[in-house]
Amino acid sequence: MSRGNVGDSERSSARSFGCVNCWPDSADSAWEARSGLDQQRELVDESHFHVLVLSCPECGQAFLSVFMESIDWDDGDDPQFWSVVPIEEAERDSLFRAAASERDLRGIAHGRRSLFRSAPKGEPQSNTWATGVVLVPHD
């Protein structure tokens, strides 16, 4: 399992990404802002692992969005997780050229502030700041 540092972290790089519309200071607001992003390209489309490149219609900032889900065979309360991180143009172009394997994703945005949304089985959903692309086991 490859997990970036999940928790209340400050911006971990001096470079600023996005705008107030797409990458606000609050993790909850950043999750809400994700729904306003435009899809640029779908990189992986599996039922329990979905990878997209999104962009802000206001400032053009590109984001990598990774959805991960594990099947719960008991009662259908499937744990779901999302990792969202702003990416540079060169990173986006590299992802567009590659097959976007999990190995490729681990090398993106190392040390950069990311959003981690967790919806574990039987627990409330939460949004926290993390670092880099957070990958959790999935089906």
Image: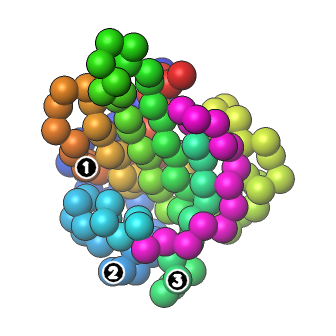
Mark before the other along the chain sequence, 2 or 1: 2
Indicate which label's residue lies in the foreground, 2 or 1: 1
Going by the numbered disc 2, the residue's amino acid type is Val
Q: Is residue 122 left or right of residue 11?
A: left
Q: Is residue 26 left or right of residue 118?
A: left
Tell me if residue 33 is in the magenta stretch.
no
Which contiguous range is marked in magenta?
36-49
Report the residue marked by disc 2: 20
Mark before the other along the chain sequence, 3 or 1: 3
Q: Circle 1 sits in a helix, a strand or a loop, which is it?
A: strand
Magenta residues, dominant SS class: strand
Going by the numbered disc 1, the residue's amino acid type is Asn
* Residue 69 position in % (x across, y down): 45, 31
Image color mode = rainbow
Report the residue marked by disc 1: 127
Residue found at x 38% / y 18%? 72
Residue found at x 68% / y 55%? 42
Q: Quadrant of residue 45?
A: top right
Label drawn at residue 21? none
Report the residue marked by disc 3: 57
Tell me if residue 40 is in the magenta stretch.
yes
Above/below status of 137 relative to 133: above
Q: Circle 3 sits in a helix, a strand or a loop, which is it?
A: loop
Residue found at x 43% / y 74%? 36
Q: Circle 2 sits in a helix, a strand or a loop, which is it?
A: loop
Q: Is residue 87 visible?
A: no
Going by the numbered disc 3, the residue's amino acid type is Pro
